[in-house]
Image (tube, rainbow, N blue to C red):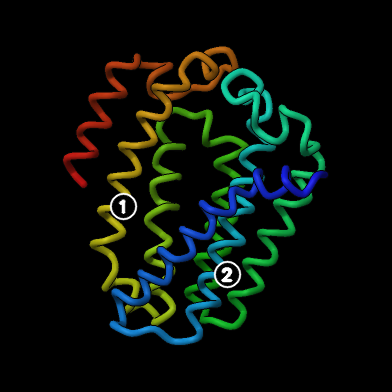
């Protein structure tokens, strides 16, 4: 595995930004920042990087059509290397939550499992994959608030809902863009089953909800 390929498959910029979203969630809930937010930041960075890596592992076939420049199709990272790296990242993120609270541990465990299931199965199922990604994006803010406990999670719920609907809209548009590769791979997405126009209209509905 080449280091540039390893970094690209983890999408570090994406993971780091997600980590800052968790810090923002904590700040919205508490109105302040404490050193402990570095733990939730690190957790989100590692789990997100693990999700990005396992997603590329399961998407290797589709990416050879849609994204041949990605690390696995381009030969920078082997499939077994991506598999092993993803589990190291998931484990590291979950271990970080040992220094937080039980709610944060539960969210990190559930999200890691959901990221794996999304990459392995849900992504190719009609609409459930879109909803999974939308929840995962929204849950970053919930995770930040959860560092304060249940009360903190409730306080950031409006932001989480906005994020959920906005991401659902985005995911539907992305599926519409990738319809050719998804048809070849047999993915059962909304535009594959119902057409690109239906996917775009549904995306508009979610955008309005957001």
The picture places residue 36, in percent across and down from the top left corner, at 50, 84
Q: Residue at x 24, y 38 (%)?
A: 206
Q: Residue at x 78, y 31 (%)?
A: 75
The picture places residue 201, in percent across and down from the top left corner, at 23, 24
The picture places residue 21, in percent across and down from the top left corner, at 40, 63
Q: Residue at x 27, y 31 (%)?
A: 203
Q: Is residue 28 left or right of residue 107?
A: left
Q: Which residue is mark 1?
A: 163
**Element marked by disc 1:** helix
Q: Quadrant of residue 130?
A: top left
Q: Is residue 32 above or below residue 146?
A: below
Q: Is residue 32 above or below residue 172?
A: below
**Element marked by disc 2:** helix
- Disc nearest the viewer among 1 and 2: 2
Residue 42 marker: 2
Q: Considering depth in this image, is 86 or 122 the residue closer to the camera?
A: 86
Q: Is residue 166 left or right of residue 183?
A: left
Q: Residue at x 49, y 64 (%)?
A: 19
Q: Earlier in the sequence, mark 1 or mark 2?
A: 2
Judged from this view, the residue extending furthest toward the front is 4
Cα distance in 3D space between marks 1 and 2:
21 Å
């Amino acid at each position: 595995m080449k280091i540039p390929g390893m970094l690209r498959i983890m999408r570090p910029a994406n993971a780091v930004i997600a980590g800052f979203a968790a810090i923002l969630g904590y700040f919205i809930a508490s109105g302040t920042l404490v050193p402990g937010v570095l733990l939730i930041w690190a957790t989100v960075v590692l789990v997100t990087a693990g999700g990005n890596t396992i997603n590329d592992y399961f998407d290797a076939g589709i990416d050879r059509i849609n994204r041949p420049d990605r690390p696995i199709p381009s030969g920078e990272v082997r499939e077994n290397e991506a598999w092993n790296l993803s589990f190291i990242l998931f484990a590291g993120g979950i271990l970080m939550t040992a220094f937080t609270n039980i709610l944060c541990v539960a969210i990190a465990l559930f999200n890691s499992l959901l990221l794996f299931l999304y990459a392995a199965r849900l992504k190719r199922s009609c609409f459930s994959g879109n909803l999974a990604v939308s929840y995962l994006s929204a849950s970053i803010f919930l995770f930040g608030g959860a560092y304060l406990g249940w009360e903190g999670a409730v306080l950031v719920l409006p932001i989480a809902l906005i994020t959920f609907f906005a991401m659902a809209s985005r995911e539907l548009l992305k599926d519409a863009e990738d319809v050719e590769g998804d048809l070849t791979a047999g993915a059962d997405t909304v535009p594959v089953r119902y057409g690109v126009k239906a996917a775009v209209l549904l995306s508009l509905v979610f955008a309005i909800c957001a």
